[in-house]
Image (spheres, rainbow, N blue to C red):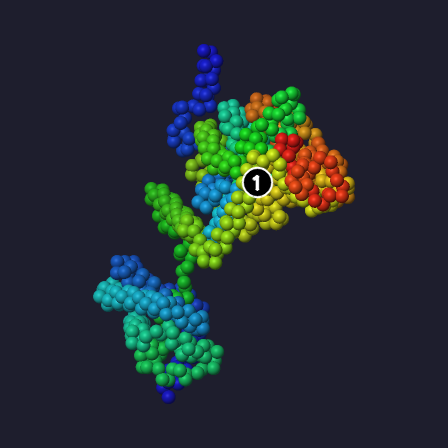
Amino acid sequence: MHDYFLFIGLPYVALFSLIAGTVYRFNSKKFSISSLSSQFLEKEKLLWGSVPWHIGIITILGGHIVAFTMPSFLQALVSNVKILYTFEALGLTFALFAFCGLIILFVRRLRNARIQAVTSNMDLVILSLLTIQILLGILIASLYRWGASWSTHTLAPYIQSIFSFRPDITYITNMPFVVKAHIAVAWLIILLIPFSRLIHVFALPLEYLFRLPQIVVWNSRRQEESVITAQIESESRRFFLKAAFGITSGLILFITGIADKIIPFFRGPELSKGEKGELLKQKLQKMKATIKQKELETERLTKDFIYISDLKNLKTDEGIYFIDYQMKPALAFKGDNGLPILYSAKCTHLGCTVTNKVKEGALLCPCHVSHFNIKTGDVIDGPAPKPLPKVKHILMDANNHIVVNIDKSKLDEYKVYIVKGENT
Amino acid sequence: MKSLTTIADFLRARFPIEKMNLQSMLMKKEVPIHKMSWAYYLGGLTLLFFTIQVITGLLLLFYYQPTVNEAYDSVKFISDKVPGGAVIRNLHAWTSSAMILTAILHLLTTFAMKAFEKPREVTWGTGVLLLFITYTFGFTGYLLPWHQLSVNATKVGLQFIGAVGQYLPGSLSELPNKLIEIIQGGPSIGQETLSRFYAIHVVILPLAIFAILGAHLLSVQLHGMSKGVDEKPKIKEPFFPNFLIKDFSLWAIAFLILFILAITIPFESFFSFPLVEPYNALGSTPEGIKPEWYFYFIYYPMELLPFWVIIIIMILLVLGLFLVPKIFSGTSRKTLTFIAIIAFIYFVTMTVFGQQIFELIKGGHS
């Protein structure tokens, strides 16, 4: 029965109190929205207490909010064991951090006479509740391990059911006492927010981080000047810090990005055996082509005649590319009379290689669109200044004798050779 | 003896020793603020691009192999296999274009701002030299991937030298062809050419550019920024740190843009595929052989006008560029700006619409 009260009744009372109380306080006692800072009474201990406490508790609350609003996201995240450990370890660390801060604050409030004077009963209640709550949280974290994981499908549905006005405490009723207590105290603290200095959570002074420093100007000429210098100094310090922060993070990003590219670049690719084989095969092919090229060169340096093709293989409309004695591309066609016509394929304009396909009786150089007459090599149009030079050739018969008198009936037996020294 | 003193005086005025200290060159330097102030950043930007070229170029050297057999495959290996290789190669290609662009704009704006006035003639002269070196960088680097486009474009480019021969008398007419053979290292483009271009691209030109760049930057810092406008500039800002911080911020933005370009758009995507196939000495030259865009302004006129006109224009242009401080010593900045704008419009028109103009005038060949 008390479960219903603690986990359904109390929450709604707490939420009502939170909303109504806060609205009331904001409307009627606007200037009481404050953390009632006691910094001017005591500074030293406050620094060591307040800062760790706030850093710790804000982080812890953030973790709780993530768990209750995005349970499936968190579940997916902590299903990776390493992330789960990290999450839990960070949670425990920050909780201990907050706990230490809270203890310092507590002791300070109980021991310092000046602080005692401004301490209300509510302050002590809140301090005690917070201490208990933190202790309970630490206990849960250490006794019932991996809360980040199990809370996502037990506590998160409960919290969501409260906020969707369909309260469901199935998962809560069988929870261990410590967990139940933690939840109940949480609602109690929420309930007390509007009636205590905890109201300051709604007056988040975020602009403190970005606004210019406010300096009190005293009503005295001499001090006024020193204040202006102080102002300029603090402003330039802020500017310098901002700039230094920006430049440093920019540089870190830049260096990380560069290193991310450069280090693997130096290390080189890690190729699979298949890829390595493929690369080697390509290299071999290239080498074979080079060998062929070198053979062609040697042939042209040493031989007086070089075989181009059998006459019967030459065509009238499509030339065969070959390499002439200058190691430049040339073309071999068959003329209308059945005899070969050989041209240098190097365009007389700027040295591009002309195409081997005859179109409308002309050869084309694709670079600057010069056309050459296939019969004579003359320029039809285009920027080429001179006709394509003819390459001198001889015919040899089947017995490798130079043909002096062409026998029209034996044309198919003839082979075409180019001749050293007589080429243009 | 008298001429020696003249030379010494000239040098003393251009490189004043009393100003060669950090105080005068860095701390006291001031940059005028006026409507042309943006042009003061172009030189720095070119310097950044040059630095990127040096670094990415050095990185490419780790894998590139300058042989006819291996060049194409090693470039492909860098692009396809080496981690980060594609980005580095692409950055090198994109930055080369960016560097030439900013160098040209730098030339035009310094011309318009009359930044060549005494005592800044040396700055101008070295600047023009640097531009020529940058163009040579572009021309020699273009051959190194050894694909159809690069080899054939180099072939065409070199043949232009040979075409000068027809205007020379007697035995001199063979001289340009001999020159080509010296550059190529043989009767046609082959391994020798690749080795030479490689040596020029990665050793000779960098050495030259470092020396000339040193003189250029030294004289810039010695004489400070030129005032840039005819009236006396009212506002000035210190070079260090104000101008320098702005300069570096611009560098960061420029690098970001280039890096994004290099990651997203392969430079070769501007060419149709047969052009970037491995070079084939025996096959026919594929269609669409063209030099890089920064040669268009002289390439299309070459295609359209008689060659002797081009030679005269080229000689006048080169001489004119070096003699700018003499020719325009008395011209007002307004006139100079007008000339620079005309030159810029011409350059842009030829670069963007060169092909259309060529087809319009020559008519369509099938």
- The quadrant in which residue B143 appears is top right
Circle 1 SS class: helix
The residue identified by callout 1 is A296
Which is more toward the observer, A13 or B106? B106
User: If the image is split into quadrants, where does the N terminus of chain B sit?
Assistant: top left
Estimate the x, y position of residue A160 in percent, counting from the top left: 45, 77
Q: Is residue A114 above or below residue A283?
A: below
The chain under label 1 reads A
Which is more toward the observer, A349 or A280? A280
Q: Residue at x 42, y 36 (%)?
A: B240
Q: Residue at x 35, y 82 (%)?
A: A175
Estimate the x, y position of residue B220 in percent, counting from the top left: 47, 30
Q: Is residue B323 above or below residue A258?
A: above
Q: The disc labelled 1 sits on which kind of residue?
A: Leu
Which is more toward the observer, A216 or B146? B146
Q: Is residue A362 left or right of residue B143?
A: right
